[in-house]
Image: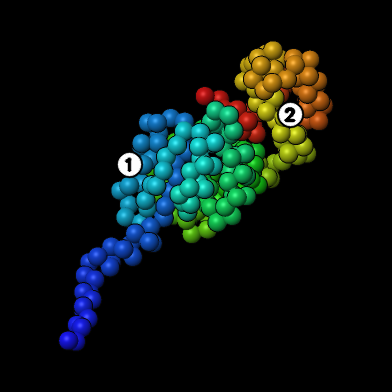
Amino acid sequence: MSRRTKKEQPVPASKAKSARAQRSRITVLLVDPNPIARDGMSCILGQHADVRVVAAVGDATEAIREAERVKPHVAVMDISMPGLNGIDATRLMTGKAPGLGVVILSTHSSPVVVRRAVEAGALGFLAKDAGTEELVRAVRAAGAGERYISQRLAHSLLDARRSAGPREKGVEVLTPTERNILKLVTEGKSNYEVAAAIGLSPRTVETYRGRLMRKLGIENLPTLVRYAIRHGIIALD
């Protein structure tokens, strides 16, 4: 008896088209400590057929873990988060996943902060008061491997470059421990609170604090706080 081979059924054109559309979508990881902000961005991006939000988390540690798990094309990340800030997280994430396009969101969009984000590997930078369509444009640009900085911020960068004096020392001159202490001190924590947070003695924290201020050429706490704000270490809000 001859064995009949089962004829393969053709895939309906509509399903094939849908599968291709799924593969061509820009996948996005949202990183923001505010759940309302995450939900809002997810709703905005979800209205566009070429974009798909695959994960949404509230801090940088979760973001790094999720980026490795879901391997998104783009991460939209708030600059100000508990623990690791968005710029340092960008440096780590793009180091592990060179093809990842990061778009930074910030309430404080000074030229210094924008420059630091770009140097860390971000492809896009948006002020948090940007319009919904600008968010979509930034995601699409980052998904294509292109830079996107809003026109208003681009003009600010050009103006700052024209009027720039001697360049201020960047946080790159500090060790990771010094940068962590800088963040905690400028958030208003005492040496004892910083010591408890990072497992050092108050006297060691004081030594680190003096060393980092000398490295930056800063002599007092108010100036240190202004420096931290300009460089995106802490936020105004």
The reply, left or right, for residue 138 in relation to residue 177 is: left
Q: Secondary structure at mark 2?
A: helix
Q: Residue at x 38, y 40 (%)?
A: 41
Tell me the crowding category of disc 1: few under 14, some 14 to 19, or many 20 or more residues within 10 angstroms, Cα based.
few
Residue type highlighted by circle 1: Cys
What's the image's color scheme?
Answer: rainbow
Depth check, front residue: 148 or 53: 53
Q: Position of residue 70 (x, y in %)?
A: 45, 49
Residue 75 in view in this figure: no
Q: Helix, strand, or loop for circle 1?
A: helix
For residue 77, side relative to residue 226 (left or right): left
Name the residue located 81 percent from the left edge and 20 percent from the top edge.
207
Percent coordinates x, y for residue 72 in the rendering:
46, 51
Which residue carries the number 1 mark?
43
> What's under tag 2, amino acid-wise?
Glu
Q: Residue 230 at what x, y percent from top left?
A: 64, 32
Eyeballing the image, is 81 above or below 152? above
Q: Residue at the far left: name it.
A: 1
In the rendered image, the quadrant that contains the N terminus is bottom left
Where does label 2 land, which residue? 178
Q: Depth check: 146 or 179 in front?
A: 179
Query: Where's residue 39, x and y in %?
Result: 36, 36
Q: Quadrant of residue 83?
A: top right
Taking depth in this image into account, of 80 and 99 the one nearest to the observer is 99
Q: What residue is rendered at 60% in x and 50% in y?
A: 96
Going 39% across and 47% down the picture, which residue do you hit?
Answer: 54
Earlier-in-chain disc, 2 versus 1: 1
Foreground: disc 2 or disc 1: 2
Q: Can residue 231 be seen by looking at this rendering?
A: yes
Kindly report the distance in space between the C-alpha atoms of the residues bearing marks 2 and 1. 39 Å
Task: Judge left or right: residue 161 versus residue 46.
Answer: right
Can you say whether 28 is above or below 201 in the image?
below
